[in-house]
Image (cartoon, helix red, strand yellow):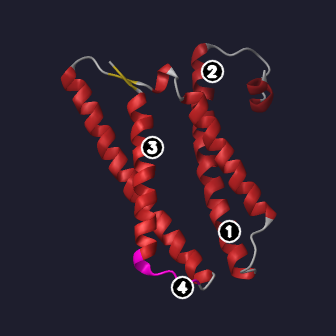
Amino acid sequence: MIKRLFIGYLTPRDERQMADIDGRLADLYILSFYLLGLTNAISLGLDLYFDKNSISRGTMLLTILMMLDAFVYIIRLWHAESVTSETFNEINKHQVVRQLQLRTIGQTLYFFIVFTSFTFFLNSSFDTTETVGKTLMTTAVGSIAWGLIMYVVGRVKIHE
């Protein structure tokens, strides 16, 4: 019923039409999630530029909304059969695990680059005296922890 009100169709839909609607809504969700992150980053940047001593309530609410959105996504799809990876033999399982490992390395590097840039930006905005080495070490540890969490989440979704 919520989908019918949101989309605005009046007559019943067949399975193909519902699959098309679901696909478009999934694309819309992913796009809105990334746009919410971009809006959050812009809002934080504007807060830091115009008022270096505080972050606005709007930025905090955007951050909380984005975190809630991510948690709902993780909880709702944690054991969903449609997002698990089925393996049929040991060779296939090894290939899937290898793809997961490569993806995890990519996610870790991406997180490291974004988190390091963000930390340097915050340090320069607030004129902190934190050294570059300490910043790199802190973000490296956080990135490795993030990568391990992403690996565990992906590994749980591999079934034989």
Residue 154 lies, in percent from the top left, at 41, 35
Of labels 2 and 3, earlier in sequence is: 2
Residue that lies at the very extreme toward the left in this rendered image: 91
Under circle 2, the secondary element is: helix
Q: CA distance from mark 1 to mark 4?
A: 21 Å
Query: Tag 3, which secondary structure?
Result: helix
- Residue at 36 percent across and 46 percent down: it is 104
* Residue at numbered disc 4: 129
Q: Which region is colored magenta? A: 128-133
The residue pinned by badge 2 equals 18
Judging depth in this view, the residue of 12 and 37 nearest the camera is 37
Query: Gap in Å between the C-alphas at discs 2 and 4?
Result: 56 Å
Residue 92 to residue 51: above or below: above
State the residue in front, 38 or 150: 150
Q: Identify the residue under disc 1.
A: 44
Q: Residue at x 43, y 79 (%)?
A: 132
Considering the numbered disc 4 on the image, is that residue within a helix, a strand or a loop?
A: loop
Residue under circle 3?
149
Q: How many marks?
A: 4
* Residue type of the residue flagged with mark 1: Leu
- Snapshot quadrant of residue 141: bottom left
Earlier residue among tags 3 and 4: 4
Q: CA distance from mark 2 to mark 3?
A: 34 Å
Number of other residues with Cα within 10 Å of mark 4, as a class: few under 14, some 14 to 19, many 20 or more? few
Q: Earlier in the sequence, mark 3 or mark 1?
A: 1
Amino acid at circle 4: Thr
**N-terminal label among 2 and 4:** 2
The quarter of the picture where the C terminus appears is top left
Q: Residues within 10 Å of mark 1 (few under 14, many from 20)?
A: many
Comparing labels 2 and 4, the label whose residue is closer to the camera: 4
Q: Earlier in the sequence, mark 1 or mark 4?
A: 1
